[in-house]
Amino acid sequence: MCDIAHHLSMGERTVFTYLASPSFPERQPHPRRSSKSLLAPYKPYLLAQWNAGQRQTKRLFAQIQQQGYKGSYMTVTRYTHQLRQAQRHQLNNLEGRGQAPPLLSIGQPPRSCSPSDLASVEALEATLL
């Protein structure tokens, strides 16, 4: 019975129940949650804000929470990441342009920077934090 359960990817108890049954009922599919995202009603607003230059995920999250969004911050983060990737892809495909440089995280200056550039980066970090 253990081998049957393993082969069919089901529990031993389920196999035992099926073997004890006089007929073999069809397996019912597992009920799934609705595929409609909690974020879906807010995507047009987020996209409009994005196109207007508002690209801070925390601020966007706070704004849609005020409008009634009950989903997670991580969902909004994934969506804004997709927007960044799409924007980057669009920029890379402009005629006459080369590849966009890789994004730098805060605290990571460009590889070839002068001491004055590093001071500018540190000053920018101080204003952002």
Image (spheres, rainbow, N blue to C red):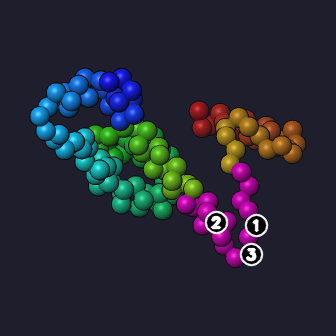
How crowded is the residue under tag 1: few (<14 C-alpha within 10 Å), some, or many (20+)? few
In this view of the protein, which residue sits in the foreground, 4 or 65? 4
Q: Amino acid at mark 2?
A: Leu
Q: Write the start and end of the magenta stretch as one range.
A: 86-102
Residue 84 left/right relative to 93: left
Q: Which residue is mark 2?
A: 91
In this view of the protein, which residue sits in the foreground, 40 or 55? 40
> What's the CA distance linking mark 3 and mark 1?
7 Å
How crowded is the residue under tag 3: few (<14 C-alpha within 10 Å), some, or many (20+)? few
Q: Which residue is mark 3?
A: 96
In this view of the protein, which residue sits in the foreground, 124 or 27? 27
> What's the CA distance linking mark 3 and mark 2?
10 Å
Residue 116 left/right relative to 12: right
User: Is 71 located above or below residue 88 in the figure?
Assistant: above
Residue 75: numbered disc: none
Q: Amino acid at mark 3?
A: Gly
Residue 98: numbered disc: 1
- Secondary element under disc 1, as helix, strand or loop, is loop
* Residue at the image point whose x is 74% and y is 75% from the top: 96
Quadrant placement of the N terminus: top left
